[in-house]
Image: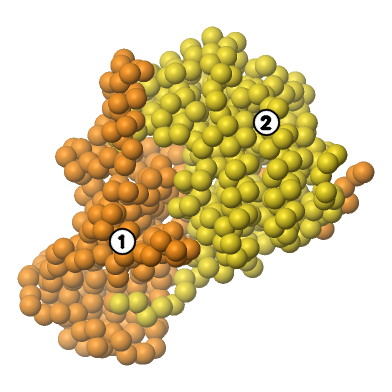
Amino acid sequence: MSMPPPPTALPTPQNMATVMPTAVDAGKSITVSSFKITTRKLPILNAQEIDVMTEKLGIAPPEMIFGNNIVSIEKVGGSGEGWKIEFNALEALDLVDKTGNDMLKVAYSAAWQKQREKMHEGIKEVVKPFDWTYSTNYQGSISGTQEFAPTTDQIPLDKLRRPDPILFFDDVMLYEDELADNGMSILSVKIRVMPARLLLLARFYMRLDDVVFRIRDTRVFVEFADGVVLREYQEKEDSYENVKKKFPPYRDDTPAIMRDPNQMAEYLPLKSVKVEKLVL
Amino acid sequence: MPGLPVDLDACIERLYKRELLAEPVIEAICAKTKELLMRESNVVHILSPVTVVGDIHGQFYDLLEIFRIGGFCPDTNYLFLGDYVDRGLFSVETISLLVCLKLRYPNRVHLIRGNHESRGVTQSYGFYTECARKYGSANVWHHFTDMFDFLTLSVVINNDIFCVHGGLSPSIHSIDQIKIIDRFREIPHEGPMADLVWSDPDAERDEFALSPRGAGYTFGAQVVKKFLEINNFSHILRAHQLCQEGYQVLYDDRLSTVWSAPNYCYRCGNLASVLEVDDAGSRFFNVFDQAPENAENRVDQQPMEKAQVEYFL
């Protein structure tokens, strides 16, 4: 019996090799009180761009590498003009340990190594050791002369909890890797701009199955009226075993939560925090 | 199909419309598929013409796009290189359709096992969650993952092109060594079966090297050359790695990667391709962009175009 033609069978050009992905969001920006906020979202890097990046970094970039994406905040007038903080994948990855000193191993590595020794003693070469979880303590790339200094000030959460209108919002991926299906590593940057202030959150999340959970958050807060910029950097981390205990075994949504950095942030203990300030 | 208490053509018709099959139907279909796959060797020999498809990862509309571009079954023969599930929104619909097509046209559709066709990986990367959400229990996930244990590991086209999900293994020099693997099991963490679904080429190298992760291999130019010589093949065809262009050719045209999930995870902006091997054995990459329907169905994924405004702190 022949199959009825599927309802979606439409004629399509045979060779679509010339069709390029559309850069649906090649860049957008807003200027509020002489602060210009820009985001750009483009497709992952192509083979040629990956070669260039690999050359620059000295390590293989993550599987999904959004090397042309950026989020930036720039002072475009008045005092502090030209000061800028930008978040991009290249400089975030440049801070990944390239020596292998901080190297984690997958949970079954010991068993795997043992098996391998029996079978393939000849293979000793390790692809250049580096922190393949792509853990970074990146807090943005700064241009301009003004520098951050330590402060006891805190980001005013009360002001950020107000339902002020959001004039501009974006969520920009910088890189992501599935750690060869041993977990996930992801760095993305969110920004929201309100009439009087803005908040940026660059969040690195890494889950190495049966080994560790890690979050590294950089928040940038700007109060437009007085030109105050606060930058807060936090590290959160816990063993997989400890985190797992917080999830009852009957819960069906545990895997989904463990894929969600925003939910996992509530489950990980704070290891360190520092706040810096500058006034433009 | 004798002994199958369901109408496959009706199932396929429903699945093309993205309708789910009932749980008992999935159970029967998976049981029958196991019987069919059990008879397949670890190295299945087929003849061209055939269209080879790489990772799909639950991107159901892009699978339909592949059929629109490459032809529907059974007019076009298909070889799928694995990674049908996880990540995308419609893993259940994708694997349901592929399994029904395999049952309906067993000699025209071939399915290879990818590293995501495993209980362990699907629990972390979405298929488990999707089954539980769409069917209200994990039963369907059990039916599918039990069936995955029977998928073959490799296919050889025209006795010339070796097809596998990931790549080569230091334990395997001749395809005869693949034939003796006991494949009817969960994908192990080590050994030749793991290597076939996991390993990646490294164009900078000649030999095998260890991944910095402490498990897994990369394989280099000489490894590929030697493997092709020993087995008297001319080409290795694999999937497993995302590429922005939809495909990548390495080692003086001795190895191709084919990637068939355009705009992977609905946000990578990459192209995809299928590889058409014609009667004469010549290879042609048919490159395509994401299906138009994706735009209407991205609910809980993060589309590239519009970020969901949120009062994050």
- For mark 1, give the secondary structure: helix
Give the amino acid type for the residue marked by disc 1 in the picture: Lys
Most foreground residue, B72 or A40: B72
Give the amino acid type for the residue marked by disc 2 in the picture: Met
Residue at 54% of width from left, 9% of height from top? B230
What percent of the width, then of the height, locates residue A243?
29, 60
Residue at 38% of width from left, 37% of height from top? A51
Relative horizontal placement of residue B277, taking residue A164 as reference (left or right): right
- Which chain letter matches label 2? B
Q: Quadrant of the N terminus of chain A?
A: top right
Q: Kindly identify which numbered label has been placed on residue B192.
A: none
Most foreground residue, A26 or B97: B97
- Which chain letter matches label 1? A
Relative horizontal placement of residue A214, taking residue B28 as reference (left or right): left
What percent of the width, then of the height, locates residue B158?
70, 19
What percent of the width, then of the height, locates residue A104?
25, 42
Q: In the figure, the yellow chain has which letter?
A: B
Residue at 77% of width from left, 34% of height from top? B106
Name the residue that disc number 2 marks: B38
Q: Chain A: what color?
A: orange
| Vertical relation: A133 (above or below) A150 | above
Residue at 31% of width from left, 61% of height from top? A245
Name the residue that disc number 1 marks: A245
Regarding residue A91, the answer to whether it shows in the image is no
Disc 2 and disc 1 on one polypeptide chain: no
Mark 2–mark 1 distance (CA, rounded to whole Å): 40 Å
